[in-house]
Image: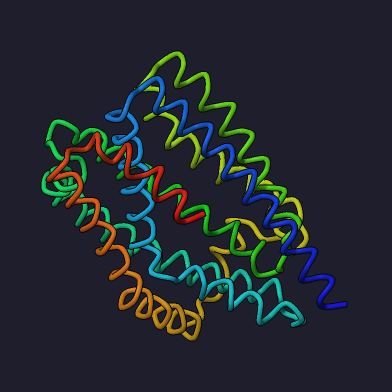
Amino acid sequence: MEFKTLLKNTSFLAGTRIVQFLTGLVRTKLIAYFLGTLGAGLVAQLTFVTQKMSQFTLLSMSEGLVKQIAENLESSQTARIINSAYKAYILLLSVFVVLSSIILYLFSSELTIYVFGELSYISYFYIGLLSFPLLILDSIPFSILKAFKDVKTIAKARIIIVIINLLLAVPLILLLKLDGAIIFVPLSYIANLLTNFFFARKIYFKKYRITVKTIFNASLSFQFIKELLVFSTFGLTIGVFSIISEFVCRGIVVSNLGVDSIGLYSPIVMWLVW
């Protein structure tokens, strides 16, 4: 029975991965055809820097939140514990987001030159800086879907997100060219956040009566805070090395070959990741 469930869940996720890959391929082809390697490189770097800002800020704390929720699903105080876990998570996350934003803003010129090759692209860096909190916020509804191991809903949400993103990307790229591709990046994060929030609210937040008010009024658990800090320490020691290594690799490509070369580099990486 467990094997059949595992096989079914794996099939769901594998199916969504295939759809995500194919639509990503279509989007990459559109960008490459209409914007050339320079446009593809700029979009790839914007997406990369936004995701890495989010990864650096989260420091694996979202995995800690998932663990805290999952461990208390059978408790008679599940709703109270989930609210308390979210309060601890949001409190720590708010501190990390503020600190990360300040650091990234202070070094925005240096990071822009390193990531994009020229200071003239600093507006793209600021778009990434304003967009990465959307990915951070998405960890809140996604955590409860993951904690309940709701693979079917996660797969459904991903398919919907893929369709929405494709419907957004095609007209934006065709009509606005590079500006449209750049605008698409934060819009895709908004679509991701709203879709996951819709399912989380419909299935779990309503069931356990979890709202902004209940989270705000929940008791603050220092045990949860301590545990999240342990996860953040792990994320800092392991995750940062991964982030730095990819930054260095891309930086070498940009400094020696130009940002347009990323337009060739990124599709290759996409195939390797797949």
Q: Residue at x 34, y 76 (%)?
A: 238
How many numbered marks appear? Answer: 0
Relative to 166, is 60 on the left or the right?
left
Which sits in the foreground, 222 or 248?
A: 248
Q: Residue at x 45, y 31 (%)?
A: 184
- The answer to which image quadrant residue 73 occupies is bottom right
Judged from this view, the residue extending furthest toward the right is 1
Question: Residue 138, position in %: x, y?
Answer: 52, 53
Relative to 240, is 201 on the left or the right?
right
Q: Is residue 5 above or below residue 94?
A: below
Quadrant of the rendering where the N terminus is positioned: bottom right
Q: Residue at x 32, y 36 (%)?
A: 263
Q: Residue at x 41, y 22 (%)?
A: 33
Q: Is residue 163 above or below residue 272?
A: above
Question: Residue 236, position in %: x, y?
Answer: 32, 74
Question: Residue 92, position in %: x, y?
Answer: 40, 69
- The answer to which image quadrant residue 195 occupies is top right
Question: Residue 259, position in %: x, y?
Answer: 22, 37
How are the residues colored? rainbow
Q: Is residue 87 above or below residue 68?
A: above
Which sits in the foreground, 145 or 5?
A: 5
Which sits in the foreground, 138 or 266?
A: 266
- The answer to which image quadrant residue 219 occupies is bottom right
